[in-house]
Image (cartoon, rainbow, N blue to C red):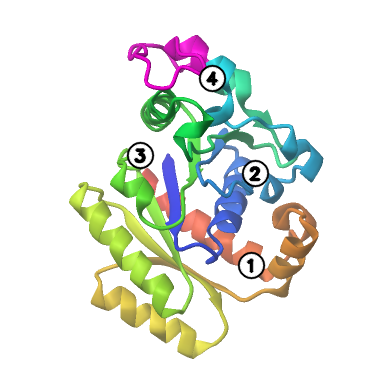
């Protein structure tokens, strides 16, 4: 199963991706969590401490690896680089085992040319993501970049299911609409909506009406839970620190539905 978790920034995308990864591991799957968001913080959701996360070098900033694979040095901006190389060894070399049992791979992002040649790093990340989604014999849960940019680059088109996380706000719903439209254009079949931060029946109604109007299938709803805020403020893992919270229970129901959907596809 290859799963991408998307949505507007701030809707709870990373928390859901992390808890979903932990739950799948708990259910007996081998799981690789991929942090493909430039604002990388999936590590804390999986139980790593700040100092442990700070030691992780994102793939996009690992110039010894980039040079090894592409033949280009960091200061060789504009240079030609190799297009044919293997990436099947990168997970074993650079993925980090987290306290909840899930392996974590931090992709990073290339922001500007001043940091070296952009092209080799971006090409390596694209090749690696393609490999993870097409070749790896394990569950991959990818916390994608907020918004629609990752879809414009085509990095998520190989997933089995795309979860679009929304909260009951106009901006979150509009972002979800754009994500769905782009995903449909790419030929994706399983585009599933998850409502988050639900306070009351009115919030649920807003999301259900949106889903009906825009032909979204709703995978589930997650109601507001103070444990999520507490975990965020402390930098702790919701899954490890609040295993009996209502949010964990609702995400587990979503997890079970998702597994059933993908097993019966």
Q: In percent of the image, x 61 and y 57: which residue is there? A: 15
**Foreground label between 1 and 3:** 3
Q: Is residue 253 magenta?
A: no
Disc 3: CA contacts within 10 A as few (<14), some (14-19) or many (>=20): many
- Displayed quadrant of residue 129: top left
Q: Are marks 1 and 2 in contact (CB under 8 Å)?
A: no
Residue topped by disc 2? 26
Residue topped by disc 3? 155
Q: Position of residue 98 (x, y in %)?
A: 71, 37
Q: Position of residue 175 (x, y in %)?
A: 37, 66
Q: CA distance from mark 2 to mark 3?
A: 27 Å
Q: Position of residue 215 (x, y in %)?
A: 24, 69
Q: CA distance from mark 2 to mark 4?
A: 24 Å
Disc 2: CA contacts within 10 A as few (<14), some (14-19) or many (>=20): some
- Displayed quadrant of residue 184: bottom left
Residue topped by disc 4? 90
- Of the 4 image quadrants, the one containing the N terminus is top left
Mark closer to the chain start, 2 or 4: 2
């Amino acid at each position: 199963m290859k799963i991408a978790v998307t949505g507007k920034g701030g809707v709870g995308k990373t928390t859901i991706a992390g808890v979903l990864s932990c739950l799948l591991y708990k259910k007996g799957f081998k799981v690789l969590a991929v942090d493909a968001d430039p604002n990388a913080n999936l590590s804390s959701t999986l139980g790593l401490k700040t100092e442990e996360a700070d030691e992780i070098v994102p793939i996009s900033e690992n110039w010894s690896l980039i040079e090894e694979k592409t033949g280009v040095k960091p200061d060789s901006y504009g240079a030609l680089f190799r297009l044919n190389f293997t990436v099947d060894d990168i997970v074993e070399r650079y993925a980090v085992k987290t306290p909840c049992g899930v392996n974590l791979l931090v992709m990073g992002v290339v922001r500007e040319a001043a940091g070296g040649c952009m092209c080799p790093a971006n090409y390596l990340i694209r090749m690696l993501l393609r490999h993870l989604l097409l070749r790896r014999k394990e569950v991959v849960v990818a916390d994608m970049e907020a918004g629609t940019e990752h879809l414009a680059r085509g990095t998520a088109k190989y997933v089995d299911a795309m979860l679009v996380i929304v909260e009951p706000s106009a901006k979150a719903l509009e972002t979800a609409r754009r994500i769905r439209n782009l995903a449909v254009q790419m030929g994706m079949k399983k585009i599933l909506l998850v409502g988050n931060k639900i306070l009351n029946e009115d919030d649920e109604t807003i999301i259900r009406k949106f889903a009906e109007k825009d032909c979204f299938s709703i995978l589930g709803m997650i109601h507001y839970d103070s444990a999520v805020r507490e975990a965020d403020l402390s930098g702790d893992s919701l899954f490890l620190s609040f295993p009996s919270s209502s949010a964990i229970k609702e995400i587990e129901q979503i997890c079970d539905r998702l597994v059933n959907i993908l097993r019966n596809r």
